[in-house]
Image: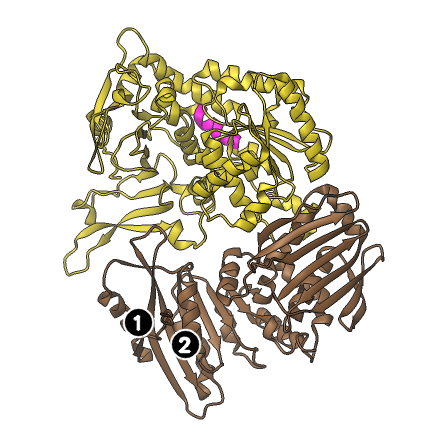
Chain colours: A brown, B yellow
Amino acid sequence: MPAAPETYSLGQPVAISDIGAELKKLWQEGEGAMTRASLINLAVYSEKAGSLEKNTRLIAKITENHACRALVIGATRESKEDRVEAWVNAHCHVTRAGGKQICSEQISFSLQGPCVKLLPSIVFSHLDSDLPLYLWWQDELPNEMDPQLWAWVDRLIFDSQTWKDFDKQMRLVETAEQEAKQRIVLCDLNWTRLDKVRYALAQFFDHPASHHHFAEMESVRVEFAPGYKSTAILLIGWLAAQLKWKTNQQQLNGSCRFLDSNDRKIDIELQEKAGSPIGEIVLNSQSVKFCVTPAKCGDLLEVSRSGEKETALPQMMPAQSNDPVDLMTQERLRGGPHRVYLCAVSAVRTLLGSGGSPNRH
Amino acid sequence: MNRAADQSQTNPLREGLSTRAVPQPCSIVIFGATGDLTHRKLLPALYNLAADGELPPAVTVIGFARRPKTDDEFRKEMEEAVRNFSRQAVRDEIWKNFAQSIFYHQSDFADESGFKSLAQQLEKVDQERGTRGNRLFYFAVGPEQFEPILKHLRTAGLNKAPEGSWARVIVEKPFGTDLDSARELNRVISNSFSEEQTYRIDHFLGKETAQNILVLRFANAIFEPLWNTRYIDHVQITASETLGVETRGGYYETAGALRDMVQNHLLQLLCLVAMEAPSDLRADSIRDEKVKVVRCLRRMTADEVAIDVVRGQYSDGAINGKSVPAYRKEEKVDPKSTTDTFVALRLNIDNWRWWDVPIYMRVGKRLPKSGTEISVHFKKAPMVLFNKETNEANVLVIRIQPDEGISLRMQAKIPGTSFRIEPVKMDFHYGTTFGKASPEAYERLLLDAMSGDATLFARRDEVEEAWAFIDAIEDAWSAKKDAPELYFYPAGSWGPEQADELLARDGRAWRRF
């Protein structure tokens, strides 16, 4: 018999003014020993149809490992109705040690019509005090954003892979940063997608005896799945920024050229190929080929270096899952500022495109 | 403790990826490769590091032991061990790769030629696998084996590394059985390896919460101003085990709880709780502060030992409803043994911060519950206003194992019209708060040794100072005349009554564990 699909309800419908009281009731009526836990406020915003249910499923999974106060917001900007609806719910999970149930609260909002503009006031009135606010913006950022919104955001999470116009969106993100009263950390899930391949590539050069290859790099080839060209360009941006390469030749039929600090040419080839968002990556120095390839099992990377005088020592390393829950988990665990990301973006901003999506061909 | 910043300057691709020092490719030679430690801890730890992508690909493991065995036989044995003891399920794809880095070297520890052939094998590994002359020698053997192994390593030239490479030695406890033997052991080690090359492992320091003590104290401004004699009444450290001596009766007869646990684990934890803030996070800066704490421990006279130390041994009893035999009936134990399986102590640290703040420690086998906790008991609020009715103090508890976390007990008003006050607990659990499972202590410590970070390893002076303190107690116990009594406690109890009296006479009691 096939397993029944998991269902996730938005919970108890409540009047906006009664949210606090209804949350309290939720705990009073709960059965068995439960601990309410919260490390962050996680606000998730989407304007896509059905997003409330989809994001409730995501929150249920995310809270298995990251207790939070979740504020899930589904908005329909174009609606003629001006209506706000709200629900409260809790996601409870048994801890790894067993026994205790750890519960995270979720407050869901459906905003229709002009009341979408009330977003900041709705978010602010339901924050768990003293905890950081992570705002996960799942759509493109609108041209006009209420500057108030940025006042309390600690980390802005987005996925540039879904952006149609990288440059325009990035400019909006930068405006948000400038308007914020405090420093917002920009968390691009498209960058998080590269975490494991960056680890795999970096480890080749941990020993000082490998460093001469930086100055001998000749070419880089990166395979990417349809729709993930921006991910591949970000990877190139990272290499360019960290190794001090500068653009020499604009993108042409999937290839481009960089110059290193000694004006040596490094040819970049980007190839679209079905499979993992980032497929095989090959760095060719004069004498050694450094290779990172997704393993057949899907969740591992095969990592190897080979050269004329070298025995190849393949190794398996964990691969990055492309599941949004895993990406969020990875992002949450990493923390800290993302200076390296901003440098990578800056190195390839022209390649990431203005006016046209790098993900479209 | 954190050298990632230095290394990211040399490998620009590491920037932002690692907040810890990056391990270097090396050969790890395990002496005692067929022993329990290798099976239960070392190989599972190395496998987990490989599975998490933390191990450089070239890392090569060479098991060194007496029994004849082929590489494949050794790999098979290790696979079984890893499947039994790894914290994460073994993936065939990962194991297959990892197994290729495991080799076996058969030799007697006393056979010089075995070390010469080891040197040849290591050179071959360097050439074929790119370990670049880096060697980590892990002594998973008894201290009586150290001398021949170290002597032959030196003769074979393996104690020195080629320029740009390193050779390090990891030594397992016990680091001696008293000050003299510890000094002798250190002398033997120092004949072959310098102090910078020597890593004395104490797995308690590899535990997440042990490392978190420094973060709790020095990354939070609220605790440090209160962390002194003015606000702290006393500190308790408890390390209890439900297990008896199992198959280790022979070893335990020569050690006892004081030598086995207090000299190393508990004093190390005390150092982290009591030390001053280091000037930076370099290994020696932290270890300098730790050793000052041990130096400040008030040495006990024989009379003081009789008053401030309680030793006990478990008799017949029951653990979790199951009858268990007395220590004297355990395998390889003298039926008239006077070995301590329980110790409770009252310590004093003679410095400004800890003046007049007693430190109570207890450690024992066959106690009702397993766990290690440190509790900091603050002084009571003035007995006025609400506190006329209540007598509870604030207690900060640092749980080292098994459920790692931190809790704070404070007073709160019970809801209602009357002013009734009850203690409540604010509780932080690692397992609940952070989804990611903590790595095993050995994983962290092996990585540190490969990265050259000695912060979580004991330094020679720490070990010797600790033995000097312990020796005073052992000497009093072994005195022919007026030696303090050995008290018996039923297995499954919290030790002899005298341990409770140790605190009761100061108007205190052990925390409910």
Classify B485 as above or below B4.
above
Q: Residue B168 appears at what percent x and percent y?
A: 61, 29
Q: Is B385 positioned to the left or the right of A300 in the image? A: left
Judge whether residue B293 is colored magenta: yes
Looking at this view, name the residue that lies furthest to the top: B481
Could you tell me if residue A267 is visible in this image?
A: yes
Classify A285 as above or below A55.
above
Q: Which residue is mark 2?
A: A53
Q: Going from the N terminus, do you reach mark 2 or mark 1 first?
A: 1
Judge whether residue A258 is colored magenta: no
The rendered magenta stretch, by its main secondary structure, is classed as helix
Looking at this view, name the residue that lies furthest to the left: B418
Could you tell me if residue A343 is visible in this image?
A: no
The front one of B393 and B491 is: B491
The residue under the point 77% across, 68% down is: A255
Q: Output the chain of dot 1.
A: A
Q: Say which of marks 2 and 1 sits in front.
A: 2
Q: Is A350 positioned to the left or the right of B55 in the image? A: right
What amino acid type is highlighted by mark number 1? Gly
Q: Residue A10 appears at what percent x and percent y?
A: 35, 75
* Magenta range: B287-295
The front one of B346 and A28 is: A28
Q: Which residue is mark 1?
A: A20
Q: Residue B467 appears in which quarter of the rendering?
A: top left
Q: Residue A19 appears in which quarter of the rendering?
A: bottom left
Crowding at label 1, few (<14), some or many (≥20) Cα neighbours within 10 Å?
some
| Quadrant location of the C terminus of chain B in the rendered image | top left
Q: Residue A268 appears in which quarter of the rendering?
A: bottom right
Q: Secondary structure at mark 2?
A: helix
The residue under the point 35% across, 18% down is: B253
